Image (spheres, coloured by chain):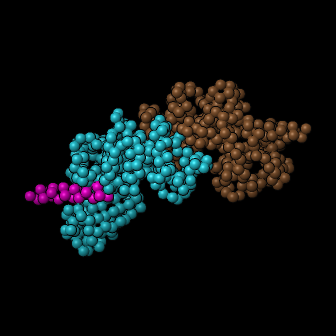
Chain colours: A cyan, B brown
Amino acid sequence: MGAPAFVAGDWGTSHLRLNLCDEQGRVLETRDGPGINAAGGNIPATFFLLVRGWDEAHGALPAVLCGMAGSTIGWRETPYLPCPVLPEAIAIQALRFEAQGRTIAIAPGLSCINRLGGPDVMRGEETQILGALGLEPQLREGRHLLCLPGTHTKWVLLDDGAVEQFLTGVSGELYDVLRRHSILVRDAAEADDGPAFQKALEQTRLHPDADLIHLLFATRSRQLSGELKREDAASYLSGLVIGRDIAGALRLFGPEPPGHVILIGTPSLTRLYEAALQAHGVATTAVDGARASLAGLTELHEALRKADFGHAA
Amino acid sequence: MGAPAFVAGDWGTSHLRLNLCDEQGRVLETRDGPGINAAGGNIPATFFLLVRGWDEAHGALPAVLCGMAGSTIGWRETPYLPCPVLPEAIAIQALRFEAQGRTIAIAPGLSCINRLGGPDVMRGEETQILGALGLEPQLREGRHLLCLPGTHTKWVLLDDGAVEQFLTGVSGELYDVLRRHSILVRDAAEADDGPAFQKALEQTRLHPDADLIHLLFATRSRQLSGELKREDAASYLSGLVIGRDIAGALRLFGPEPPGHVILIGTPSLTRLYEAALQAHGVATTAVDGARASLAGLTELHEALRKADFGHAA
């Protein structure tokens, strides 16, 4: 490990992770904090409180942030770069400013007109994609379909390393609000990829023309009929949502369904998508989301540092 | 108006309406009370408290109830009658018992294996369908597609007056949980059938192969892009949900989309479905849901009274 060189932060809606890194992006220490929603009006104070110990030990190192830190409810608003765009461009368009004697850079997001003709946006995933391109260099050539599952799952079409376009599925949020607030699930058990999940996946495959609206009620009616245990309802719901997310996306990114999808996300979630994609006959490669994010932030830090040297020269 | 003869009650999940009726089902007085969820363990007490004034004035008249009163969390559990079934059969299978010197009858629900091969159930709508058959006698001949929009919208195939099968869309609940708990809508305004609703309907028609999961995010992204006003987001969301409910149901009840749909529900909701069905080129006839429910309960009361006379003779 080298000496502490910079702070890398992925600041999402519901979670903040700050890593103290050496120049190569190896993590020396980690601090977790509240997401942008919980931090509310107190974004800078939240940040400075979390890094205080590091500052006292190592001085005010530069910080590189991505995610909702750049949103209208974040620290400072950064633009959306329109697609098609090379992920490397986020370094050029990063917003840089000084705060309490420290340089802070916030990555911009990406925007596009998606497959359904609507505006679409991402914040944070562009940095994960940049990182994934570093971790899996073969992604820089040819066409690839990426899936970044989460609250708002992003399906991303890469063409020779450029983000050509993407599409958001609100799968994570839909699962979450239905699980917590609907009559479909009345049990605290978490979803897993067991038989109930597989059964629901099968339903989405058997009925490709059925909308999620008409598949969902079975989560309850199968409990009433005794086919589904109360504690398996969350897994069944998860299978329906993920199954429809995948079936719909594969269809929209057709005409030929892609034979391979690169999954970037938390292992517990990519595992569910992996199982569902395999059931569709689609092979997968999983990249850890936190690792991709860190790799992207490190590349961003590196690019900004080089630009500074160039500027100074 | 005749003398008070019976109490007709539609006891749903979130609302109870009791009507004091004469022998012909004309309403003399009305009391509103809590739904089964709010009444909790106190179902009989809630009922007796609401009818106390009527009992003092007219004696303990027989009561006829439908809806969640017959569910596992209701007053007493009634069975589900399997389809195909004539709605008149709910009179034969009604659960009757004595409580505090009064005869109480609770209508059974209906069950079927739906178009997607899953178990499906209804409670309360069967009584509305029975009532609608009385109000619109032409429904007793030929095939008709009925739509009863609500928390759990029921699409019902009638064949010569019998309920052949039905399908539940969780449209109302989906709209409600997303409106109240997701980041898609951040405004208290209610949905209407204005331009935002129409725009969303158009999206569901333009992209018949897109799942709701991939259409929903535009509710937020169109606000970010300035295309959609914050206060119109609920209407846009409503248009997406109703549009997909209709497109999916018309497809499932194909091959030929039916040219006419009978809507049974509250006028504010049937109006939205009417607008959406017309956009699909489908004509509609609307029947007021409360009126249908009362007509069904009246027919149930009448059938039970006749059965008693027969029994007594």
In the picture as drawn, the residue positioned furthest to the right comes out as B313
Residue occupying the point 41% across, 51% down: A272
Q: Who is closer to the viewer here, B8 or A3?
A: A3
Whole-percent x, y for residue A215 in the image: 52, 42
Q: Quadrant for residue B21, please give it.
A: top right
Q: Who is closer to the viewer here, A202 or A178?
A: A202
Whether residue B278 appears in magenta in the rendering, the answer is no
Q: Quadrant for residue B267, please give it.
A: top right
| Position of residue B229 in the picture relative to residue A66 (left or right) | right
Mark yes or no: residue B16 visible: no
Whole-percent x, y for residue B64 in the image: 76, 44
User: Vertical placement of B158 versus A226: above or below?
Assistant: above
Q: Quadrant of the C terminus of chain A?
A: bottom left
Mark yes or no: residue A15 visible: yes
Residue occupying the point 55% across, 45% down: A218
* Range covered by the magenta-colored residues: A290-313
Whole-percent x, y for residue B130 in the image: 71, 35
In the picture as drawn, the residue positioned furthest to the left comes out as A313
Residue occupying the point 75% across, 43% down: B94
